[in-house]
Image: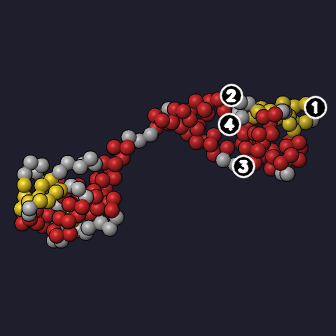
Amino acid sequence: MSSVEFTNLLSFFKVLSDESRLKIIGSLASKERSVDELASLLGLRPPTVSHHLSKLKEIGLVHMRTDGTTHLYRLNVEPLRKLSKNVSALDRLTVDDSIAEDAWERKILGDFFDGNRLKEIPASRKKRFVILKWLAERFKLDKRYSEKEVNAVIGKHHPDFATLRRELIGAALMQRKNGMYWRVVAADL
């Protein structure tokens, strides 16, 4: 979908976002009507109906014909068919979730780190997990670490190594047994 088509689609939805206009479309779906008929049916003043009809006419949803001095309006369904086609094309506009997630994680890392120093441990569990994944990557997958070694690695980045060490275990990014620690591959890594 081109940017022009997207802009047209936005304009179309903007026009349709008004309840009175939707009621007018519904009234015109059954038959051709005049401004006065629509005003009576919908409990609106004729100038208000005329205003809404002009907006609907701009996007091609209504056609007008004259019958003497009366203007009669009818629904044009073709723009609705095009709308349906364009809405189904919106799937091409979706953002790749993995790209969006990577960008969000980079932002979190940028917000909470000053160089390689963690400024603070995030209170939000989701943000904290991003930080913990980053910390876990400081450890080799195939190596066992003593508690002292784990503390030294974490301590390079934040002074509260005990909390972060426990958080790494709790997040299943590291495991511990008999005083030895090792990094594990989590499904979200």
Report whether 117 appears left or right of 79: left
> In the depicted view, which residue is nearer to us: 175 or 16?
175
Q: Earlier in the sequence, mark 4 or mark 1?
A: 4
What type is the residue that disc 4 sits on?
Answer: Ile
Image quadrant of residue 182? Answer: bottom left
Which amino acid lies under the numbered mark 3 shown in the image of this protein?
A: Glu
Q: Badge 1 is on which residue? A: 68
Q: Are marks 4 and 2 in contact (CB under 8 Å)?
A: no
Q: Nearer the viewer, mark 4 or mark 2?
A: 2
Secondary structure at numbered mark 1: loop
The residue under label 4 is 59
Q: Secondary structure at mark 4?
A: loop
Relative vertical location of residue 21 with respect to residue 107 in this rendering, above or below: above
Image position of 89 (left or right of 99): right
Task: Tell me the residue that label 2 is attached to.
Answer: 78
The mark that comes first in sequence, 2 or 3, is 3
Q: Residue at x 86, y 36 (%)?
A: 33
